[in-house]
Amino acid sequence: MYFENFAALINMDGHGIYVWVSVAVTLATMLWLIVAPLISQRRLLKEVSRDIQRQQDRDLAAQKASNYEESH
Amino acid sequence: MSWLSKWLSKWLSKWLPNESPSWQWFYRLGSPRWFYLRSGQWLPWLSLAALLVLATGLVWGLAFAPEDAKQGNSFRIIYIHVPAAFLAQSGYFIMAIAGAIGLIWKMKMSFMVMKAAAPIGAVLTFIALFTGAVWGKPTWGAYWVWDARITSMLILLFLYAGVMALQYAYHSVDAASKASAILALVGTVNIPIINKSVDWWYTLHQPATIKLTSAPSMHMDMFMPLLVMIIGFYLFYAVALMLHTRNEILRRERKTSWVRELVNAKAGL
């Protein structure tokens, strides 16, 4: 390591605050670029499966209705 | 002149996408289903590579590279500032080229990539501006100066924002895509201005550290971690672009049978 110890790495001769703030903001925004699409992907897939379920329910109801009409 | 146009069209048909088998990948890439399934296979490996390369470059640059003789340790911000600025500009080209392909070949997949690239580019431009401002304080004594390099980067941020906003300005997806693509293409004029701004105008900003045409103006011990970080940012960009594009595919293709089959297969039905 270039620095003598961990404290020197954090302090960086007084420049630590600038460097570490830059690193923190960068990593946080980059993480958001990955996490945000993963969350919305989950939501989208859930919506699709809800659509499928609704379609199946509707088909089943239609089936029942036509069976009822046939038997009466 | 007719021989010229004949020769030109012959030459173009050879090099631009055509019906020959060697161009099949281009048409396959145009299939949202193919892209969605394939990118799902690539993503774990690409993410792992991005993570490893970024971690290596960051630790190397922050803890092991020697400090700058003039700027001291504040120069270490270069290891995120330069890669972010690099990708902010490369990402703009990717967005504009995707828009052009969409306009020329009416490829929907390409428009989806363009739409996905806009927020990623905007965030990378923000990172470049933010880290630049923080770096400016100990180096120049000011967070912000209205010089050509910084102002043209700010315009880049607005161009990305414009492309994002245009996507929602139309009821028709097709019209939104075309308008965004045209804005993206017109905006490319800003990229050479960003690149040349440090040479054309008097500025506090230091000249480019890395040029394709000459050796880097920094010591190898400092340059190697920067190179690693740039590669890492490219890998990260690929991962982010794929994730955003996959969502756009799901959003637009949610009614199709292949998406439903995919969801059913996942639910174990």
Image (cartoon, coloured by chain):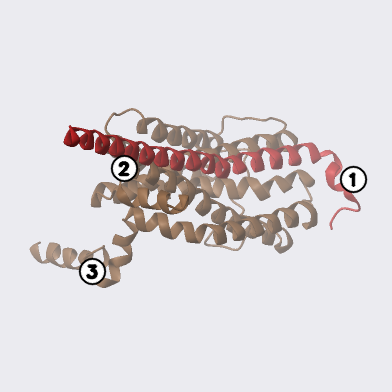
Relative to B119, residue B214 above or below:
below
Query: Quick check: can you spot residue B37?
Result: yes
> Which residue is pictured at 36% across the width and 31% down the height?
B166
User: Toward which corner of the image does residue B48 lie, by quadrant?
Assistant: bottom right
Q: Amino acid at mark 3?
A: Lys
Q: What residue is shown with label 1?
A: A7
- In percent of width and height, residue B99 lies at 33, 46
Q: Amino acid at mark 1?
A: Ala
- In percent of width and height, residue B10 lies at 17, 67
Q: What element does badge 2 sit on? A: loop
The mark that comes first in sequence, 3 or 2, is: 3
Q: CA distance from mark 3 to mark 1?
A: 61 Å
Relative to B253, residue B176 above or below:
above
- In the image, which lettered chain appears red? A
- In percent of width and height, residue B208 lies at 59, 50
Marks 1 and 2 in Cβ contact (< 8 Å): no
Q: What residue is shown with label 3?
A: B14
Colour chain B is painted in: brown
> Which residue is pictured at 44% across the width and 43% down the height?
A45
Q: Amino acid at mark 2?
A: Lys
Instruction: Using the image, name the chain to which the residue with label 1 belongs.
Output: A
Relative placement, left or right, of A51 versus B73 is left
Query: Which residue occupies the foreground of this view, B159 or B108?
Result: B108
Nearer to us: label 3 or label 2: 2
Disc 1 packing (10 Å; few <14; some 14–19; many ≥20): few
Q: Quadrant of the N terminus of chain B?
A: bottom left
Do discs 3 and 1 share a chain?
A: no
Q: CA distance from mark 1 to mark 2?
A: 57 Å
Marks 3 and 1 in Cβ contact (< 8 Å): no
Q: What residue is shown with label 2?
A: B255
Relative placement, left or right, of A7 versus B193 is right
